[in-house]
Image (cartoon, helix red, strand yellow):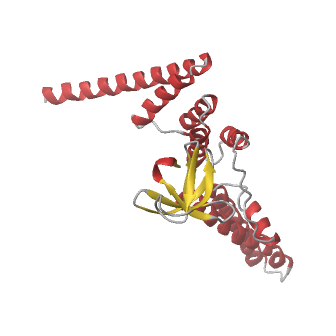
Amino acid sequence: MRNLFFLLVLVLASNSAYAFDSQALWKEAAEFYDQGNYKAAIEDYGTLLDRGMESPALYYNLGNSYFKSGDLGHAIWGFRRAILLDPGFKPAKANLDYVRTFNTDQIAVKRRGFILDIWDFLSGMLSANGYLVLTALAWWIAAALIVYQVIRMNGATWPYYLLIVPLVIIIFSAGSAGRRIHEDRLTRWGVLGIETADIREGPGGEFNRVEVAHEGLEFKILGSRENSYLIQLGNGLTGWVDKEAVLEI
């Protein structure tokens, strides 16, 4: 029993020392960043990631450090990782939009038609959780209208017309939540982490080059084979690129 007690004390002491060391490392990384020593800050934040300390703020700080050091691909990777963990992280979104302006490859998103473009815009305004909350709220409003009509039983038709509004919201928000879950959690995304890379017709250097990609280019990862990823750009172009050139988000 005594040995068990000492073991428990030792574990708690080790965890406390580990947490204190991580806090000190976080503070040191922030100091390095303020001093303009961005590579040292990146090393410290990377050490925290290796220790399993993953958070939106950590990836956000990494993104800032990478951008200041001139590493566009890793900067985009850091900001997108932060947004993946916290879709409502506005500073990461703002910095991501700013960093994207430095991309050599400004790929226009393929248009799908006026109605579908509006759907894409509206269904991308909130996170999946935000649309799920909106769905639940609309359900409660619809239920309240139904209960009101049952209790009053006065034959009024206006509650039925009013019921159309929450039903439309339910259909829209549920569909939008499904889209956000698919885009943010089920779709694999990547960003080019080196200066240039060839996009080829097949998985290997023997295939013809389709396009030359530059650092910071973002894309969907559709599949993989051997040492290559099959990717799709925002304009619909597909091709293969070396895995070593890709940072998977």
Number of marks: 0
Q: Is residue 237 left or right of residue 27?
A: right
Q: Position of residue 234 (x, y in %)?
A: 67, 60
> Closer to the camera, 69 or 162?
69
Front residue of 71 and 30: 71
In percent of the image, x 47 and y 27: which residue is there?
43
Q: Is residue 203 above or below residue 57?
A: below
Position of 246 compared to 145: left or right? left
What residue is drawn where x is 27% and y is 28%?
Answer: 11
Report which quarter residue 75 is drawn in. Answer: top right
Task: From the top left corner, tell me how far across and down residue 23 is, in percent.
Answer: 46, 23
Give whichever of 100, 239 is nearer the camera.
Answer: 239
Compared to residue 15, the image places residue 162 above or below, namely below
Q: Is residue 173 above or below residue 212?
A: below
Q: Residue at x 46, y 32 (%)?
A: 46
Left or right relative to 221: residue 96: right
Residue 93 image-quadrant placement = top right
Q: Is residue 179 visible?
A: yes
Quarter holding the N terminus is: top left
